[in-house]
Image: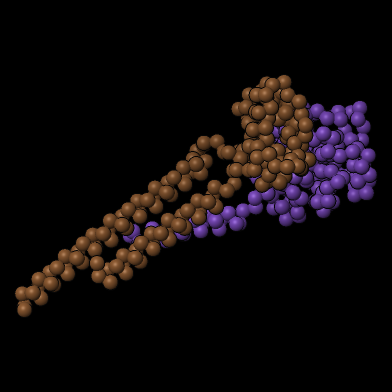
Chain colours: A brown, B purple
Amino acid sequence: MTVASRAAHGKRLSRIVLFVGSLAVAGVAHAQSPDTPAAAPGRAAPLVAFESAEQRALYETLLEEYRCLKCQNQNLADSNAALAGDLRREVYERVVAGVPRSAIDSYLIERYGEFVLYRPRFRATTWLLWIGPFLLLGIAGLYAMRLARRSRSEVRVEADRIDEARALLRDER
Amino acid sequence: MLRFVPLIVFVVLAGFLARGLMLDPSELPSPLIDRAAPDFELPTVDDAAVTVSRRDLEGEVWVLNVFASWCAACVTEHPVISALGDEPGVRLVGLNYKDAPKAAMEWLARFGNPYDALLDDREGRVGLDYGVYGVPETFVIDRAGRVRYKHIGPIDEETLRATVQPLLSELTATPS
């Protein structure tokens, strides 16, 4: 490989790295919202009694996954807002009464909209949100592959030319 | 063509982010719009023996204003709500949200009481059914009992004139 072609190759490669890197950063920024810290100290959820461990588990999962509307970056478990307390009470009463999870979801969605769910349901309006990152990754992969293939073929062409030139030089001598 | 891919991705991403910056994340679209206003039956603030239910308002155009004496923005909004109380053919219903009746009465004595009916929602359960998350909030309900408009936060004069009043005159003009 000549110095010139190596330099061109290096430039291509660094461009690919830059592109994929920027996508990765975008992906991280995109993925930041849903995960909330589990059992944080001093959480706002009051002490409550349950008939079974399943009910307690359901209650705790739900509080992690519902958004507090008043302080939108906290879930119901972590928020100290009065509204979060009211919603915890409503969720608790339903869990203890044996209401299934889907019905509790709809109860909140009817009042506050899909936004109340930290993990949005797969809908006509949310499919892009769910498969968008994979779509972007696929596009980036295709782009990287095509770039790599093209630069490889360019190197081959240049190598052929150098051989030709050498042959010419040899003939002239 | 291939070399423009990063540019295109950047422009699309920048477009979405710019749009995101211009939206107010505290204002959520209400799922109640064009749906039936939730039922309620509550005692009135001035007399706990008297109750008012949604059925009492059937066939009327009414405005539900969620307020509380502990809410600072409600004071700012109050002159605008008072103007709503003068609107012909419109019933103005106050939902006193998570408040003590005594405090509410004192507050109204000080700033004026424009409400045709004053509901005592001490525990905030009716507020919850209406998806209230920031006081003040205001709902406009038509003769068929459907929520036609919701405003979150204090209504200013501009919104009153440009949005609420035209909607109210349209709704009162349609017979039940």
Instruction: Name the one closer to the observer, A68 or B139.
Output: A68
Which residue is pictured at 35% across the width and 54% down the height? Answer: A143
Identify whether B15 is placed above or below B176: below
Which residue is pictured at 72% across the width and 44% down the height? Answer: A70
Q: Quadrant of the C terminus of chain B?
A: top right
Identify whether A17 is placed above or below A47: below
Instruction: Name the one closer to the observer, A163 or B32.
Output: A163
Quadrant for residue A12, please give it: bottom left
Instruction: Name the one closer to the observer, B94 or B167.
Output: B94
Which residue is pictured at 69% across the width and 27% down the height? Answer: A56
Instruction: Name the one closer to the observer, A118 or A19.
Output: A19
- Residue A45, image x, y percentages: 75, 36
- Residue A147, image x, y percentages: 32, 58
**Would residue A147 be found to the left or right of residue A19 on screen?**
left
State whether residue B35 appears in this view: no
Identify whether A105 is placed above or below B135: above
**Would residue A141 be found to the left or right of residue A63 on screen?**
left
Which residue is pictured at 79% across the width and 35% down the height? Answer: B124
Q: Quadrant of the N terminus of chain B?
A: bottom left
Residue located farthest toward the bottom when viewing the structure as drawn: A173
How many marks are shown on the rendered structure?
0
Quadrant for residue A55, please give it: top right
- Residue A89, image x, y percentages: 75, 31
**Would residue A37 be found to the left or right of residue A131 on screen?**
right
- Residue B111, image x, y percentages: 90, 49
State whether residue B49 appears in this view: yes
